[in-house]
Image (cartoon, rainbow, N blue to C red):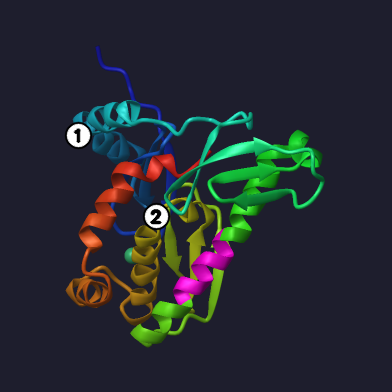
Amino acid sequence: MNHQTAFVLVRSSRQTLAIEIRPDATVVVRAPRRVGLRDIHRFIESHQNWIVRKRMELAARPQPQRRKFVEGEEFLVGGRTCLLQLSDSVSPAVDLQGDRLVLSAKAHSKARETVTTWYREHARRVITERVQHYARIMACRPSAIRITSPRRRWGSCGPSDSLNFNWRLVMAPREIIDYVVVHELAHIRHKHHGAEFWDLVGTFFPEHKAARRWLKDNGYQLDF
Ligand SMILES: [Zn+2]
């Protein structure tokens, strides 16, 4: 039986057709403005096996455990497992005390929002410090450092050399944070992923392959 794959079509000034599978398994086709629907359908047809394989991979991928913000739940901070503790105290809303993440009573009703805000602030402190450290030794100066919340990316470098980092990255071990920092700083010099780019990354972070592997395998856990 021949049934057509549902897809989202995104037209732009690009030159070629491309397919991607979103985390929710939606098929997205990116197409140049002038390519007709018949060609697009034919393109999807010719990638049917690839689509099926990608969707199976996606279904098999473990999902982060959705936290309920109850006492004793595990949260990652800098690669360490911290246990959530609900406290009667009013302030601060969230406090990291050794390996306990203490959430104040007044924040219980909006726990997810409060803990996310704390992580974002923690990410800003930790990541800014690491960027400043590596910016000095790499002689790459970012125009700004932003903490953002993309779904799929850990960092990016804007055209004006501003660097963006996903706040969830602060859940990862320090060396993984350092890898992403070095990677984005290297983009200030090289706006591509060519040999020169990886040479520069390798000079300041020789274990970059292992770090990328780690993010690929474990990145899904950096969420709650
Ligand atoms: Zn890159």
Q: Which amino acid does the dot numbered 2 rest on? A: Pro
Magenta span has 101? no
Residue 8 location (% of width, % of height):
44, 37
Q: Is residue 60 above or below residue 126?
A: above
**Residue drawn at the location 44% of the way across and 48% of the way down:** 80
Q: Dominant secondary structure of the magenta stretch?
A: helix
**Residue drawn at the location 22% of the way across and 35% of the way down:** 47
Q: Which amino acid does the dot numbered 1 rest on? A: Ser
Magenta span has 130? yes
On screen, residue 70 versus residue 204, left or right, reads right
On screen, residue 112 versus residue 30, left or right, reads right
Is there any visible trace of residue 159 in the rendered image? no
Closest to the observer, 163 or 6:
163
Tally the marks.
2
Residue named by callout 1: 46
Image quarter where the N terminus lies is top left
Q: Residues within 10 Å of mark 1 (few under 14, many from 20)?
A: few
Which disc is residue 173 wearing?
A: 2
**Residue drawn at the location 42% of the way across and 54% of the way down:** 153
On screen, residue 120 versus residue 175, left or right, reads right
Q: Secondary structure at mark 1?
A: helix
Report which quarter residue 39 is drawn in: top left
Q: CA distance from mark 1 to mark 2?
A: 41 Å
Ligand 1, by image quadrant, is bottom left
Span highlighted in magenta in the image: 123-131
In primary-sequence order, the first of circles 1 and 2 is 1
Tell which residue pokes out farthest to the front in this image.
Answer: 98
